[in-house]
Image (cartoon, grey):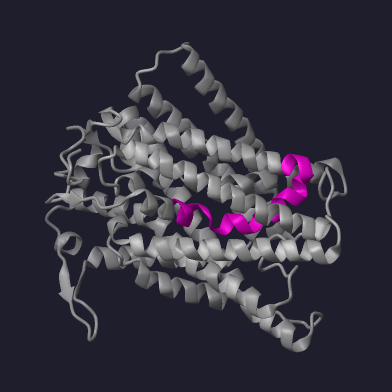
Amino acid sequence: MGEEGEDNQSPLLATSSSNAVVSAGPVKRTGNIWTAIAHIITGVIGAGVLSLAWSIAQLGWIAGPIAMFMFAGITLVSTYLLCDCYMYPHPEFGPNRIKSYMDAVHFYLGEKQHKVCGVIAQESLYGNALAYVITSASSIKAIQKSNCYHREGHNAPCSYGDTTYMLLFGSVQVVMSQIPDFHNMEWLSVVAAIMSFTYSFIGFGLGFAKVVENGRIKGSITGVPAANIADKLWLAFQALGDIAFAYPYSIILLEIQDTLRSPPPENKTMKKASRIAIFVTTFFYLCCGCFGYAAFGNNTPGNLLTGFGFYEPYWLIDFANACIVLHLVGGYQIFSQPVFAFVERWFTKKFPSSGFVNNFYTFKLPLLPSFQMNPLKICFRTAYVASTTAIAMIFPYFNQVLGVLGALNFWPLAIYFPVEMYFVQKKIQPWTRKWIVLRSFSFVCLLVTVVSLIGSVQGLIAAKLG
């Protein structure tokens, strides 16, 4: 590892596709526990936090908080397993570094698993970007509606579309997507993390104030009633999918860990950062979710800050939604940069002599420092942003989309692959105690994923047809 936090990025394996990511010179790693926490919080506290009051409302006062603690614990276990897979053969001293989730799957599990994981991983990252487009448009629209209700009254027909705001957010992301890589994003993650704390505090504060105003805690042990048992189960399963979406960040963990300097060893720093980040996010999730449900009971909106359970003070609603948008600008990049890196590495390996792929051109604009542009990066990243924006315009259903994405990706990315890689890294033999415990853990999580996916898909289809 070395004192300087640098390495020459030698190939991990002669046959590994990660050869394509070897850079020409050493990379200086300057990250620490605080930048890691900022990256994690930016990636985790995002669109998901706004749906948690609705999720608790579907599950009720007992099952709702239990589900949150359960997913927090599962995420922490998964994170610990994955942190030890960054270095090989020794989790602290390596010497081989595995710099991304995809490279780790290839290194530990082979080409076949790598291809399967590749499809799921890129879909997960793409899906998160898609969800952020939907959420940002909802928040910008909420600012407009809040001002309208303040001027015209709470019963005024204040109606605004999503399309314009999605296009506006997409335009901003076209520019932001030209940030080279994770190593250049510390400032953006810090700003985004501050924004996430701010709007989470506001959501918690508004919910608490509403409970005090009501003079009682609304809600029930069984949650929102439904017309029949089947409908109740669909909603409960969808709620689990929403909570599953709100927690895991396995797909970006190794990229974050690769920004950390050493000593101390990267896996120890990352585990400590994960403990702190998961504790903080769980606290905020419980505050926002529980106080939101306590404030509105059976009328809890799907999105706490855009569903207009709160009308006043309108300026605070506006500020909270502005913070959401600023956070999502950074969150979108946190989940998109690994996709950019993966695709661009593939093109570099496939077309090593192409000027379109490999040449950089320096530009200098007035009052700004010079910067380098690459034709492939401009074209691919712009097309990527355009596609997420277009699909979000077709399926602008907040809770249903989050539920499907959470359920679809939770087990394979947060549980299955980390467990399997940990078996290889630690050389755990079949039918040992640790092997049985982790296999059982994986199977239980699979069952949760299946029921969540069923409920979320049913909700998405019902929303589209309805």
From the image, give the main secondary structure of the stretch colored magenta. helix
Q: Is residue 122 visible?
A: yes
Q: Quadrant location of the N terminus?
A: top left
- The residue located at (73%, 84%) in the rendering is 150
Q: Residue furthest bottom?
A: 151
Where residue 178 appears, x then y in whole percent? 31, 67
Residue 319 lies in the magenta-colored region: no
Q: Is residue 299 left or right of residue 269?
A: right
Q: Is residue 244 left or right of residue 55?
A: left
- Residue 159 against residue 375 in the figure, above or below: below
- The residue located at (29%, 43%) in the rendering is 99
- Residue 444 against residue 455 in the figure, above or below: above
Q: Is residue 93 left or right of residue 112?
A: left
- Nearer to the camera, 408 or 29: 29
Where residue 422 appears, x then y in whole percent? 39, 27
Where residue 356 appears, x then y in whole percent? 18, 64
